[in-house]
Structure formats: C-alpha cells, structure tokens
Image (cartoon, rainbow, N blue to C red):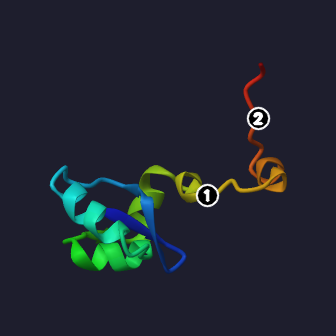
Amino acid sequence: MCFEVSGRREPLLAAYRAGAASIWRSALVEAPSFLEVHSLLRIRVLPEARLREVDPEARAAVSLNAPDDLVRWAVEMPRG
C-alpha cells in the first residue's frame, strides 16, 4: 500500500509485505524505477485525500534534499 501525492506514487511512504522482498531484490538487478517494481507487486494505491485525513499538509510525503528544503518546511536539525 502506498499513497499517491500530486499525481505521483510515494513508494517510501508505504507498507509492504515481507514476501515482496524477494521480488524487489530480483528486480533491483535491473535498476528499475519504483513504478517498475510496483508493477511486479500487487500494490494498493491510496489517494492523496486519504493521507490528508491524517496529515492535512501531506508533510509525510515531503522530500528534504537540500538546505533550502529544511528552511521551507521549518525543519531543525538535531544538535551534536
């Protein structure tokens, strides 16, 4: 099960059965996209509206890839 946010699947914001690991492992040999791996699995895709029921800003699906992203989303890095 994964969410779709802004028209794209969020494969890291998901739950997978343990049995999917062997399929995933075999597929990784070819370096596929998440969408390609998902095509090999039975994935239930939940709409963004379902995520927003528990996370109105859909912050769980935000990618933090650069320092500006931390500022934009008011994320503070742990000290130390």
- Residue 15, horizontal then vertical, whole percent: 30, 53
Residue at the top extreme, as displayed? 80
Q: Is residue 54 above or below residue 11?
A: above
Amino acid under disc 2: Glu
Identify which residue is drawn at 26% across, 66% down.
Answer: 26
N-terminal of the pair, mark 1 or mark 2, is 1
Q: Is residue 42 above or below residue 62?
A: below
Mark 1 is surrounded, within 10 Å at the Cα level, by few (under 14), some (14 to 19) or many (20 or more) other residues, namely few
- Residue marked by disc 2: 76
Q: Is residue 70 left or right of residue 6?
A: right
Q: Nearer the viewer, residue 54 or 27?
A: 27
Residue at the left extreme, as displayed? 19
Q: Nearer the viewer, residue 37 or 71?
A: 37
Q: The N terminus lies in which quarter of the figure?
A: bottom left
Q: Nearer the viewer, residue 34 or 44?
A: 34
Spatial distance from mark 1 to mark 2, Cα to Cα? 15 Å
Q: Nearer the viewer, residue 26 or 80?
A: 26
Quadrant of residue 23 within the rendered picture: bottom left
Residue at the front extreme, as displayed? 29
Mark 2 is surrounded, within 10 Å at the Cα level, by few (under 14), some (14 to 19) or many (20 or more) other residues, namely few
Quadrant of residue 21 within the rendered picture: bottom left
- Residue 66, horizontal then vertical, whole percent: 78, 55
Q: Which dot marks residue 14?
A: none
Amino acid under disc 1: Val
Identify which residue is drawn at 22% across, 71% down.
Answer: 41
- Residue 44, horizontal then vertical, whole percent: 25, 69
Identify which residue is drawn at 83% across, 50% down.
Answer: 67
Q: Is residue 6 left or right of residue 3?
A: right
- Residue marked by disc 1: 62
